Image (cartoon, helix red, strand yellow):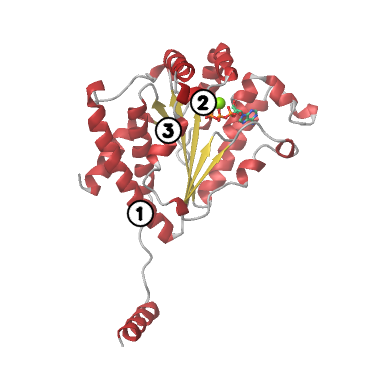
Amino acid sequence: MKTKEIIKRARELSEPFRISKGKNFRLKDVDPDDTLDFTKADKARSKEALASGVEALAQLQDKLYAQDKWAVLLIFQAMDAAGKDGAIKHVMSGINPQGCQVYSFKSPSADDLDHDYLWRCMKCLPNRGHIGIFNRSYYEEVLVVRVHPAFLAKQKLPPELIGKNIWEGRFEDMRNFEQYLARNGIIVRKFFLHVSKKEQKQRFLDRIDDPLKNWKFSSNDASERDYWDDYMKAYEEMIQETSTKYAPWYVVPADNKWFTRVIVASAVIETLDSLDLAYPEVDESKLKELAAAKKKLLS
Ligand code: ATP
Ligand code: MG
């Protein structure tokens, strides 16, 4: 496939999952097992699509880096075992590591808790010309922290600031923060990898049964399943409240890893393509400099 076709296809594939306006979003409308027009037997075809997508991505990233104007921040959120790590690994496999930064946000440290919650994420924002990846992010502040109020209690917030509007306030701050980033040329795209409770169970069982995957399993992940419905409610409201034109969510079906990867790659391609990236033009004096250098090298 030619690059132009790949980009067109990427737009078609990612568009159905992009939420730019959250008001009417309902999580139940997204089937975690959805594979669009790919049948399950099409896994091979999807691998091809991913491979050509990864190549197109590499070309776009090269221009992003050379142009040194825009930055792209990709945020990944999901329940455990939804495939965040695999999606990041596969989609970014072709790109130049020099232009990419990945950060994982786990439980906050004592130093983190001594600051506002955006602080640790702000320190990790991508440089211009770079793609930054957040594996989890400040969105945990309206997910795990909302589901487990004990985390909020540890945040050392002045008690008078913890009212019933705290989540609404956080949504507003996140929208404003992302608007600020957009106004600074930092393009934010957010991915919720939507796995079903049934498929998650299967993946946990695989992690328990396969010695090579044992390290990935934590019993805490399994006990979080008791809070599944609370998490889904929190995710749904987060998407409703923080989907914007300048920082949309992609709600990506995640029961089939091969499909998830194709959609994430497509969304990133579509995003980079929308930036009108171009190699910097060389001016008259630079052309003279090049000609002089060539002459010297050939003499
Ligand atoms: P993953 O499951 O994403 O591959 P991991 O299992 O390697 O990552 P964990 O050690 O599980 O990493 O750390 C992630 C944990 O940290 C998650 O349970 C997440 O909810 C939690 N976490 C992240 N941010 C916060 C936060 N701000 N407050 C409390 N817990 C948080
Ligand atoms: Mg985990």
Query: Which mark is drawn over residue 276?
Result: 1
Residue furthest left in the image? 1
Classify residue 47 as left or right of residue 107. Answer: left
Q: Is residue 81 something that shows in the picture? A: no
The image quadrant where one finds the C terminus is: bottom left
Classify residue 105 as left or right of residue 33. Answer: right
Mark 2 to mark 3 CA distance (whole Å): 12 Å
Which circle, 2 or 3, is nearer the viewer? 2
Mark 2 belongs to which amino acid? Lys
Near mark 2 (Cα within 10 A), the count class, few <14, some 14-19 or many ≥20, is: few
Identify the residue at image location x=73%, y=39%.
Answer: 111
Query: Which mark is drawn over residue 17?
Result: none
Which structural element holds mark 1? loop
Residue furthest bottom in the image? 299
Work out whether mark 2 precedes mark 1 in sequence or the reverse, and give the earlier one: 2
The image quadrant where one finds the N terminus is: top left
Mark 2 to mark 1 CA distance (whole Å): 40 Å
Residue 36 place in picture, x, y as percent: 28, 25
Q: Which residue is mark 2?
A: 216
Q: Which residue is mark 3?
A: 86
Mark 1 belongs to which amino acid? Asp
In the rendered view, would you say 175 is above or below 122? above
Residue 275 place in picture, x, y as percent: 38, 51
Q: Tell me whether circle 2 and circle 1 mark residues in contact (CB < 8 Å).
A: no
Mark 3 belongs to which amino acid? Gly
